[in-house]
Image (cartoon, helix red, strand yellow):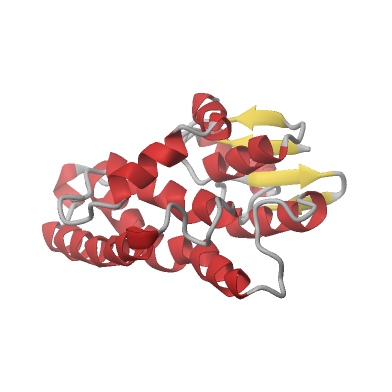
Amino acid sequence: MKLYFAPNSRAVRVAWLLEELGLEYEIEKYELGDASMRAPDYRAIHPMGRVPVLEDGDIRIFESGAIVQYLLAVYGHGQLQPGTMTAAYADFLQWLHYCEGMIMPPINTIVVETVLLPPERRTEVNVKRATNLLNQMLTAVDHRLADRDYLAGEFTAADIMTGHAVIVSEGLGADFSDKPNLPPYIERLKERPALQKALAL
């Protein structure tokens, strides 16, 4: 397997899962904004010129959540997800997809407006709106963790997906002052050797 990867990107989630499952893989490493990712050769691999992309034999897949579900289905052997006939499976699916549906859209806006755009093109109104929305989305995660260590019972791939988004939120300076369950959750995740390996790539 080959993972097209850049630090500080959604590709970290995939590397984290690969490490958790103990799978062997090679890395094709880029930096975010690398001009080579906009070249025709790379766009033939990912049409938007982004990461992650996973190649597994003749299979190529480039959406992080889809990659996670593919790896669990093909190589997970029941690991890191509840059984499909259990009540916890619905919770697992909800929190597996919560990050992309709810947390990452405002994060994307914040990153564009505060990092990617030149100062003269930034819009403070957009940043404030996205920050408020991110706060709401993170509050739901905090409430979910009020009486549990992980989102769907035991540690699962839902924590890889949404947990990674929470970690990214912290890195962007999200306000956790009214979310007492998020800092210890992040610490639990960062203690996992598989995440430490993925972050060190």
Rendering quarter of residue 104: bottom left
| Outermost right residue | 58
Residue 93 placed where, x, y %? 58, 69
Q: Residue at x 46, y 66 (%)?
A: 98
Q: Dividing the picture into quarters, in which one does residue 146 lie?
A: bottom left
Give the quadrant of the C terminus: top right
Say which quarter of the image contains residue 30. top right
Q: Position of residue 153 (x, y in %)?
A: 53, 59
Residue at 18%, 52% in the rendered image? 122
Task: Please name whichever residue, 130 or 43, is drawn nearer the observer in this view of the structure.
Answer: 130
Give above or below for 199 relative to 117.
above
Q: Which quadrant is home to the N terminus?
A: top right
Q: Is residue 119 above or below residue 178?
A: above
In this view, the residue in front, 165 or 82, is 82
Observer able to see residue 116: no
The residue depicted at 70 percent of the width and 45 percent of the height is 54
Who is closer to the viewer here, 112 or 119?
A: 112
Q: Is residue 155 in view?
A: yes
With 117 as the anchor, is 11 left or right in this view? Answer: right
Expressed as whole percent of the image width and height from the top left, the position of residue 18 reads 68, 39
Q: How far across and down, in percent of the image, does residue 149 sit?
A: 43, 52
69 vs 91: above or below: above
> How many numbered discs?
0
Residue drawn at (56%, 54%) of the image: 154
